Structure formats: C-alpha cells, structure tokens
Image: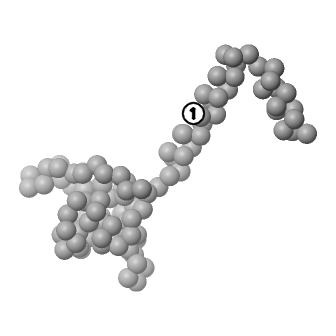
Amino acid sequence: MMKQKLTNEILLMDKEQLLEAIKEVVNDSVQSSNKSQKTYVYGINGLASILGCSRPTAQRIKSTGKLDEAISQNGRTIVVNVEKALELIRLDRKYNKKYPYVPSRRIN
C-alpha cells in the first residue's frame, strides 16, 4: 500500500519537483555514506601502503607510538584507521623537515 501511494505521488509531480526530490535523496545518501564510511587497512603491509614506505620503515613508525591513536592491535592482528593515521602523520610532519610529503592515497 505504501509503495503504491509513493508511486502515485511521484507520478503527480512535475519535472522540477521530481528533480528536487531526487537531489535531496542523493545528497542525504552521499552525506550519510561519507560520515559513516571508515577505511581500514590491516597489518604492517597495509600501513606501509598508506604511508608510501617500506615494511621496515612502517614498523619503525608504528613502534615510535606516534600512530597509537589510529592503530588497534590484538595479538598479531593490526588494524589501522587510514584517515586517523594520515592525520597524525600530517601533524607530526609539520615539524619534521626530512619527510615533508605525505601521500594522500585512498585505499579501497
């Protein structure tokens, strides 16, 4: 019954009303997916891929504790929040002249 009522309302809309309704639905969908979507990588290989460095360098960076807020580890399983890790590296590299570049790659 609900679908039929919604279908009738859509059929009665003019072009401008329909376009406005579609825009609202798309904007709401995009905003909710951007807020709820967190990207994670797993292991030292994943950390190395988002930082654009080798595995030993990624291990050294992890061992310094600079990324502890972005890393959760249970035993041998390492999970890295990509957005948080890149933000922490950016904040740290403001003062580090040796590595001025932080890759902005997105891992999907």
**Residue 45 pos. (x, y %):** 30, 70
The residue shown at (14%, 50%) is 100
Q: Nearer the viewer, residue 94 or 32?
A: 32
In the current view of this chain or complex, which residue is farthest to the left? Answer: 98
Number of numbered discs overlaid on the protein picture: 1
The residue drawn where x is 82% and y is 32% is 6
Amino acid type of disc 1?
Answer: Asn
Instruction: Report whether residue 67 is seen.
Output: yes
Q: Between 88 and 48, which is closer to the camera in this rendering? A: 48
**Can you give x and y, in whole percent of width and height, for residue 17 in the image?**
70, 19
Instruction: Identify the residue under disc 1.
Output: 27
Residue 14 rendering spot, x and y as whole percentages: 74, 16
Compared across the picture, whether 84 is left or right of 59 comes to: right
| Residue 64 visible somewhere in the drawing | no
Decide if residue 75 is on the left or right side of residue 64. Answer: right
| Above or below 21: residue 57 | below
Q: Quadrant of the C terminus?
A: bottom left
Quarter of the image where one finds residue 64: bottom left
Residue name at image x 25 percent, y 56 percent: 89
**Mark 1: which secondary structure?**
helix
**In the image, residue 36 above or below residue 76:** above
Q: Is 69 located above or below residue 4 in the figure?
A: below
Q: From the viewer's side, name the closer residue of 55 and 61.
A: 55
Q: Tell me what residue is drawn at x 64 percent, y 29 percent.
A: 22
Residue 95, given in percent of the width and then of the height, sits at 14, 51
Q: How is the image coloured?
A: one colour
Which quarter of the rendering shows the N terminus? top right
